Amino acid sequence: MGSSDSLDPLEELHAQIRRCRRCSLSGVRTKAVPGEGASDASVMFVGEAPGGDEDKQGRPFVGPAGRLLTNLLKGIGLGRPQVFITNIVKCRPPRNRDPNADEIAACNEHLLTQIAIITPKVICTLGRFAGQTLIDKDLSITREHGRPRRISGILYVPLYHPAAALHQANLIDAIEADMRRLGEILAEELATPRPQAAS
């Protein structure tokens, strides 16, 4: 038995992320944003990078795009505490620019370790960068949004980033339709027990 003050693996990882100095973003962040949610979540949402609100609070998806995501989740019967939400890059790029390849690479081990600890059955990538990092480097979000793909036993579902609807109002119908479809996918996927490790 460990000591009462020992951290569980996910908490320890998140403590490491908050101290991380692997790339230059560590020098301009206010707070690192490891992610939050259930440590045994069946469903994981992975976005691009923290924005200004997230940088201030150290929490993912708490700005306007986060409020939209929360409402979309409610629409399919999910609350934020039931899922795990994070980003491929854990620190805010200056002026909300796109993350650079070296920043994504520096954070990739953190993300893969989160996935290994949480062992989700379904990972929803939000936007182009997350989809290209976790699913296919050539993924086109406009062509493949809402189309699930199974990789190494995990079902990946590429979705538009909620922020896209804030900038392009014509995308909201597609985003809502994809979320309804996700609800159907989850109902089917989560009804199947996770495979047990061989004894």
Image: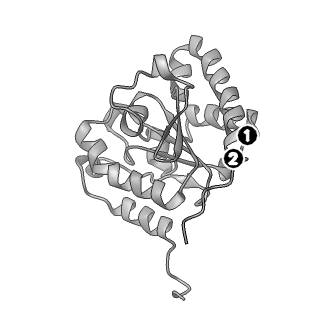
Q: Secondary structure at mark 1?
A: helix
Residue 75 position within the rendered picture, expressed as x and y whole percent measured from the top left: 75, 33
Res 31 seen here: no
Task: Kindly indicate the quadrant of the structure image that contains residue 177.
Answer: top right
Q: How many marks?
A: 2
Neighbourhood count class around disc 1 (C-alpha, 10 Å): few under 14, some 14–19, many 20 upward = few
Answer above or below: position of 184 versus 103: above
Residue at image position (51%, 29%) is 161
Three-letter residue code for mark 2: Leu
| In the foreground, 99 or 154 | 154
Q: Are marks 1 and 2 in contact (CB under 8 Å)?
A: yes
Q: Quadrant of the N terminus?
A: bottom right
Residue at image position (61%, 17%) is 174
Q: Secondary structure at mark 2?
A: loop
Res 193 seen here: yes
| In the foreground, 1 or 122 | 122
180 with respect to 34 (left or right): right
Q: Residue furthest top?
A: 170
Question: In this figure, which residue is indicated by the disc labeled 1?
Answer: 187
Q: Quadrant of the C terminus?
A: bottom right
Answer above or below: position of 101 versus 1: above
Residue at image position (50%, 80%) is 6
Question: In this figure, which residue is indicated by the disc labeled 2?
Answer: 190
